[in-house]
Image (cartoon, rainbow, N blue to C red):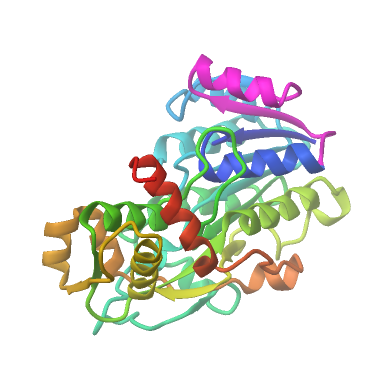
Amino acid sequence: MKIFLLGATGYIGGDLLYLLNKTHPEYEITVLVRDQDKAAIIAAEYPRVKIALGDNNSADVIAEEVVKADLIYHAANSADDVSSVQSISHALRKFSTDKSIHYIHTSGTGLLTHDAGPSQPRHGKIYNDITDIDDITSFPSAADHRNVDEIVLDLATAEPERIKTAIVCPAVIYGTGRGLVKRSSLAVPFIAADVLKRGAGITPEGEWVWGNVHVEDLSRLTLSLMEIAATTNAASSTALWGKDAYYFVEAGESDWADIVRQVVHEAHEAGLIQSEEVKYLNKTDAVEQGGPVYAYFFTNSRSRGSRARELLDWEPVQVGIEGTIREAVMAEASKLGML
């Protein structure tokens, strides 16, 4: 199988490339890389992997590689990058062939934050990616990631017998990746660095809940889809691919306040801060003191990934998010020169 992979030097795509290289050396993989320095890193570790130089705005390069591939995988800011997803869609529609081609698109459960705050109509709802699929595929365009998801959904209905799509939506991703360039996630390292810099934690008032999943469990799910795509007899399932093929990827849920408290505890236990002080703030004060990222901690995104569990026999096997917090704290402390 020939795979065109966007995001090989990123956190998600880098971990998947590691797993692909380890488990399927027979796959022919081409990766999109933006510069020669990163291309050299990939080539040194994975000599069988081909390099296509370009970025998400390199429409001609993307189109050229799309038409060669049996499967396209996108995790390079894919949830919000309209340009690259349009390039993939246009190429798949324009260069028609007799063979089936698969597109696995990485989005995210940020979609579910829409109207999900206290007193809002979607507050408290846990979305099941099978039983709630009609609701999931009809969010307004203003919802996070929705404008890009719509491009993929339109593609799914254009030629469903030839173009087979899946939208993989991880919740908060955690854990150390196995990629070559970017190996750390966003949320927990951000909180850890902020706690270490200010010597205390700040956390939202109230209960704000998101699902989460280890990066290695996410890669296993994506690999399962790729393996199915490589098996001709199994590749035509309408449950696996197409307009309803949303895969929420979660191993459980956490309240952001619990995460902050544990970060503070681990930092204090390691002697990196002087106390276990946590300040509970409203949204305005949290953003003012901690920056705009803190606005996201005042959202809910609750999901249940039944599709992968039922159709792929997938279950999370890695340690829960709580078991990775000390490692994240120590990693950020090292970056800050505190060790």
Which of the 4 image quadrants contains residue 210? Answer: bottom left
Residue 323 appearing in the image: yes
Image point (39%, 56%), residue name: 187
Closer to the camera, 221 or 130?
221
x and y, in percent, of residue 89 in the image? 54, 38
Image point (62%, 35%), residue name: 5
- Residue 128 is one of the magenta-drawn residues: no
x and y, in percent, of residue 97 in the image? 73, 33
Vertical arrangement, residue 19 with respect to residue 213, above or below:
above
x and y, in percent, of residue 146 in the image? 40, 56
Closer to the camera, 192 or 132?
192
Quarter in which the N terminus is drawn = top right
Closer to the camera, 197 or 9?
197
Vertical arrangement, residue 218 with respect to residue 304, above or below:
above
User: How many numbered markers are drawn?
Assistant: 0
- Residue 25 is one of the magenta-drawn residues: yes
Quarter in which the C terminus is drawn = top left
| Magenta segment | 24-49
Question: Does 110 sit left or right of 273 as displayed?
Answer: right
Vertical arrangement, residue 273 with respect to residue 116, above or below:
above
x and y, in percent, of residue 129 in the image? 57, 72
Report the residue that reaches farthest toward the top.
Answer: 36
Image point (41%, 58%), residue name: 188
